[in-house]
Amino acid sequence: MKNLLVLGILIIFLTSCREQKQRYFAESAETKTLEAGIAAYESGDWDTWKSHFADTAKIYVNSKDAITLETRIKDLTAMTGAFSSYGFEKDDGYIEMVLDKDDETWVYYWGQHNGTMVNGTKLSIPVHLAVQFADGKITAEHVYFDGTEMNAAISAMQAEAEAEAETESSDE
């Protein structure tokens, strides 16, 4: 009986100590790819930015509806054109790679996006990216941020430009 009890405890001990697959990573090839994509975004290098994505990638920006890479580049070009400088805070960002329960590879990024618009307005917006990878390429990107402040600032700049154009045309 004593041997049976020891054997039972040994089996429980051995099965509880089995090695589990690592699922969370602070650094990986995928986190480096996302960091390189962020650097390409910050420099406006859209060809390099696009090179990190699979041809069939789906991008979701505050929406459940996907847009294409070409549409995203067009939107980013228009948005960044309203800024004299922009980028993410380097020291406060957080990035991790996760293998989910289905062994899909996801990289999560939380960062603070700061920028100065061409009219001098300063903005600071928290951003979250959830990026799915397969075979080293981004296959899905989910971008979440509150664009209220930025949209208001862009609208104000547009209204200001229209008012200036109206004033100039009435002076002629």
Image: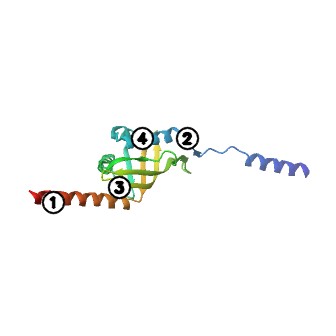
Q: CA distance from mark 2 to mark 1?
A: 55 Å
For mark 4, does the 10 Å Cα neighbourhood hold few (<14), some (14 to 19), or many (20 or more) residues?
A: some
Answer with left or right where residue 82 lies relative to residue 28.
left
Q: Nearer the viewer, residue 115 or 43?
A: 115
The residue indicated by pointer 4 is: 39
Which label sits in the foreground, 2 or 1?
1
Could you tell which of marks 1 and 3 lies nearer the N-terminus? 3
Could you tell which of marks 2 and 4 lies nearer the N-terminus? 2
- Which amino acid, by three-letter code, is at mark 1? Thr
Which label sits in the foreground, 3 or 2?
3
Q: Position of residue 83 (x, y in %)?
A: 33, 49
Please tell me the numbered disc located at residue 167.
1
Write the residue at 46% across / 42% down. 34
Q: CA distance from mark 3 to mark 2?
A: 35 Å
- Which amino acid, by three-letter code, is at mark 3? Thr
SS class, disc 1: helix
- Asked if residue 135 can be seen in this view, the reply is no
The residue indicated by pointer 3 is: 121
- Which amino acid, by three-letter code, is at mark 4? Ala
Q: Nearer the viewer, residue 116 or 71?
A: 116
Q: CA distance from mark 4 to mark 1?
A: 40 Å
- Location of the C terminus by quadrant is bottom left
Write the residue at 44% across / 47% down. 88
CB within 8 Å, label 2 to label 1: no
SS class, disc 2: loop
The residue indicated by pointer 2 is: 27
Which label sits in the foreground, 2 or 4?
4
Write the residue at 39% across / 40% down. 40
- Which amino acid, by three-letter code, is at mark 2? Glu
Could you tell which of marks 3 and 2 lies nearer the N-terminus? 2
Q: Residue furthest right?
A: 2
Q: CA distance from mark 1 to mark 3?
A: 23 Å
